[in-house]
């Protein structure tokens, strides 16, 4: 296998499982994918790993540009990708990788009381709650916590809405608009 996707904290897995030189690389935008092509067009004399952390934060355009390299890497080149959430990774990326789930990694809901308060509220109160969230990282964490809380509770009614909102926030969608749309779509679901 020439490509691995580690779900969870990949540091210990990478250190213990892959005994080869590693080149860390940030892949988030299409420009990053073009820069990576410049590096990977050369032949490597020994087995070398390109380590791309948080592949689930990359834009769809960047991932599509990266697919060709992932499908047909040069000799002696291995890709090691990490992601916090397998559900946020494009299926075309997953299908080209050996998925390694780090069982020692447990995602934690940072603000469970905020999530339960949000879910128990009426639509107007939900809007008031999300209007308080101004920071992108805070918004992303809020939606990730919604996903985790719902998954742990076995409630998948709004999962598609949560995942779409998370994707749009990661693609620099307007924070207020995305969170308000989340609330409206939840209400429109009739659930």
Image (spheres, helix red, strand yellow):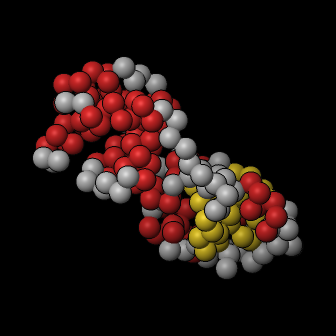
Quarter that holds the N terminus: bottom right
Out of 19 and 33, give the one closest to the viewer: 19
Near-viewer residue (110 or 35) = 110
Whether residue 60 is visible: no
Placement of 36 over or under 132, stated as above or below: below
Tally of numbered discs:
0
Q: Position of residue 74 (x, y in %)?
A: 71, 74
Vertical arrangement, residue 121 with respect to residue 103, above or below: above
Report the side of 21 relative to 160 (left or right). Answer: right
Q: Residue at x 65, y 48 (%)?
A: 26
Q: Residue at x 27, y 34 (%)?
A: 120
Picture coordinates of residue 78, whole percent (x, y) = 72, 70
Q: Determine the residue positioned at 85% across, 68% down.
A: 19
Instruction: Determine if residue 77 is in view.
Output: yes
Above or below 133: residue 76: below
| Residue closer to the observer: 138 or 74 | 138
Q: Quadrant of residue 182?
A: top left
Task: Tell me residue 183's x, y (percent).
Answer: 24, 36
Which of the 4 quarters of the picture holds residue 80?
bottom right
Report x, y in % for residue 114: 40, 30
Residue at point 86%, 73% (across, down): 46
In this rendering, position of residue 59 left or right of residue 156? right
Of the pair 64 and 91, the residue shown nearer to us:
91
């Amino acid at each position: 296998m020439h490509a691995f996707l580690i779900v969870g904290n990949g540091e210990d897995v990478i250190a213990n499982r892959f005994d080869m030189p590693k080149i860390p690389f940030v892949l988030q935008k299409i420009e990053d994918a073009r820069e990576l092509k410049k590096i990977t067009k050369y032949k490597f004399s020994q087995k070398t790993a390109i380590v791309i952390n948080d592949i689930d934060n990359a834009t769809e355009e960047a991932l599509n540009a990266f697919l060709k390299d992932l499908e047909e890497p040069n000799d002696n080149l291995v890709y090691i990708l990490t992601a916090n959430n397998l559900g946020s990774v494009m299926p075309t990326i997953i299908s080209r990788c050996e998925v390694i789930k780090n069982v020692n990694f447990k995602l934690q809901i940072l603000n469970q009381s905020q999530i339960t308060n949000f879910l128990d509220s009426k639509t107007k109160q939900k809007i008031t709650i999300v209007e308080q969230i101004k920071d992108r990282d805070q918004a992303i964490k809020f939606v990730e916590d919604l996903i985790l809380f719902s998954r742990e509770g076995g409630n998948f009614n709004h999962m598609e809405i949560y995942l779409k909102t998370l994707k749009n926030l990661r693609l620099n969608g307007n924070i207020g608009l995305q969170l308000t749309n989340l609330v409206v779509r939840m209400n429109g679901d009739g659930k």
